Image: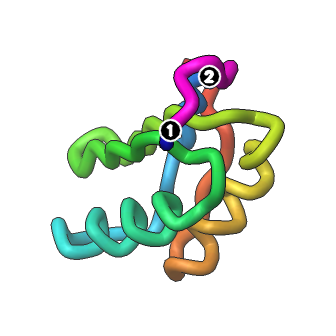
Amino acid sequence: MVSTTTNTIKTILRAEGFSCPSCVNKIEKQVGKLKGVESVKVHFASARVEVVHDPTLATTDDLVAAVAKAGYTAKPAAF
């Protein structure tokens, strides 16, 4: 059962180092494995990674680390 009372937030990351659409799938799969992540959307053209997650279970550092584990670099975006 999925709880609907979690306090989720949307975090935007800027990713670097990916050059093909298949890279998008690798990032989405790796970040999506994290506990507390509800959705991941990678925008290939703008290199934006939008993650809806529970920050008490998956911190921004966890998200960045998951992108790194997929083989790319990412950092929180201001917009």
Earlier residue among tags 1 and 2: 1
**Label 2: how many Cα within 10 Å (few below 14, some 14–19, many 20+):** few
Residue 2 — which label? 1
Q: How many marks?
A: 2
Which percent across, then down, holds residue 6? Answer: 66, 24
Q: Mark 2 — residue?
A: 9
In magenta stretch: residue 4: yes
| Spatial separation of the CA atoms under disc 1 and disc 2 | 16 Å
Q: Are marks 1 and 2 in contact (CB under 8 Å)?
A: no
Which percent across, then down, holds residue 57? Answer: 77, 46
What amino acid is at disc 1?
Answer: Val
Q: What residue is shown at x 33% (from left), y 48% (from top)?
A: 42
Q: Which of 72 and 25 lies nearest the eye of the viewer?
A: 25
Q: What residue is shown at x 60% (from left), y 56% (from top)?
A: 74
| Helix, strand or loop at mark 2 | strand
What amino acid is at disc 2?
Answer: Ile
Q: Is residue 47 above or below residue 33?
A: above
Indicate left or right for 16 with 62 as reference: left
For this orientation, the residue located farthest to the left is 21
Secondary structure character of the magenta stretch overall: loop
